Amino acid sequence: MSEMNNEFEQMLDESFKTIRNGEVLEGKVISVKPEEAVLNIGYKADGILPVNEYSNTAEDLTTEISVGDELTVKVLKVNDGEGQVALSYKRLAAEKANKRLEEAFENNEVLKAPVVQILKGGLSVDVEGARVFIPASLVSDVFERDLSKYEGQEIEFVLTEYNPRKRRVIGDRKQLVSKEKEEARAALLEKVSVGDSITGTVKSVVDFGAFVDIGGVDGLLHISEMSWGRIGNPRKHFKPGDEVTAFIKEIDGDKIALSLKFEDTNPWNNASEKFAVGAIVTGTVARMTDFGCFVEIEPGVDALLHVSQIARHHVDKPSDELKVGDVIEAKIVEFNEEEKKISISRKVLLPEEPKEEPEEEKEEVPQMPEQDEEPDSSFADAIAAAKEEAGDSDGIKEKVEEVKEDLAQVAETVAETVEETVEEVKEAVNEAMESIDKAAEETEEEVKEAVEETAEETEATEETVEEATEEPAEETTEE
């Protein structure tokens, strides 16, 4: 019985084919779970296909394959340690994709593949299971900081480097974009000319203007051509995606300049009627100068308000009265259509300013003392007496004259008193000087006497010294 079992197992083993690592074979899905699928590969053991060996992006196999599907897979291990065969689907696909990339690189073929990942330095695209990296500098012919718009899109590119050993497969989209634009520009230039109206879409807005896509070609709409009036910041008037209709102002080689300043909208049309001398206009102060300011009375039309025409009174600087943005009303006083110059006046609309009258000089009248106050001077006594005695104006005049005489006498008396005081002061000063001179003389005499005494004492001392010096010499000689 045992011999029959052994023979049956041997016959069963021989009925299954033999496999080896790396072999490519066909398998049929017999069960699927989110994390793995089981395949019948015609071998004594089933093959196991994990989700991470199906593709780099799959997360749930039940959404990718179904029972009964037939797959071409590659054997990774004949025995994975549990008596099962480890399979891979993505590696076989990658090998096929690498072969495809190699052929495309050698033939400079244009490939088309979806963007599967946005990386820090560029894009990652999937070509039949193989990854190709496109650096940010090779994504477009202009630098694009934000590449997120390419996620999920299918883009065309060519391979500029293929080195599977170092895992360097580099794609280039920039040269295709540049070539496409050159062809579109050449085609556009053949059918357009200066003055033609054209509709395009704003691609980007910069400080000096906006770039408009006019059929695969970028035209520049300069800030000075956006309006007849002033445009401070183009971003406040245009944004990417806006549709604009402009006309071609200039063609310089492959550069196209656009303009929105159509002649039929020129504000100087019929200007002689709108801005005739004497007309009252309202405008906004646009810019300041030392000699005045320019007021925009209509978009694209500026009028000069001279400093002398700002106000009725004298104005040193325009900025003392006005500032940019002020809305004012003025009258047109000069219009020159040929030179496109308009002068306006603000002061003619202002009311006359009242003139300041000089104050009349009033004669000062001495204040009379209050009735309840007692005068303390001869003048007050005289006035009071005059009031009592005088019965009419003549009497008052006489009393006033008498008062004047009294005051004159008082003034003479005061002057004499001052002179006497001055004389007394002079005498006191002279006496003080005499005392000082006398004291100085006495001091000088004392000093002289002290000097003479000192001189006599000095002579006596010298004689004594000489005598003392001569005596020893005589003694020595005698000996």
Image: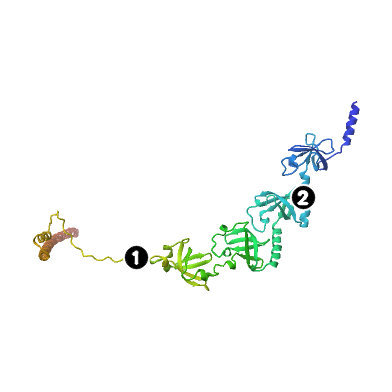
Q: Which amino acid is tagged 1?
A: Pro
Q: Which residue is mark 2?
A: 98
**Residue placed at 79% from the left, 54% from the top?**
103
Quadrant of the rendered image containing residue 156 = bottom right
Q: Which residue is mark 1?
A: 354
Image spot of residue 344 (x, y percent): 46, 68
Mark number displayed over residue 103? none
In the depicted structure, whether residue 46 falls above or below residue 355? above
Image spot of residue 325 (x, y percent): 48, 60
- Nearer to us in this view, 400 or 157: 400
Q: Which amino acid is tagged 2?
A: Asn
> Dot 1: within a 10 Å radius of its alpha carbon, few (fewer than 14), some, or many (20 or more) residues?
few
- Nearer to us in this view, 192 or 61: 192
Task: Name the side, left or right, on which 326 lies relative to 403.
Answer: right
- Nearer to us in this view, 138 or 166: 138
Residue 121 appears in view: no
Of circles 1 and 2, which is in front? 1
Q: Secondary structure at mark 2?
A: helix
The earlier-in-sequence mark between 1 and 2 is 2
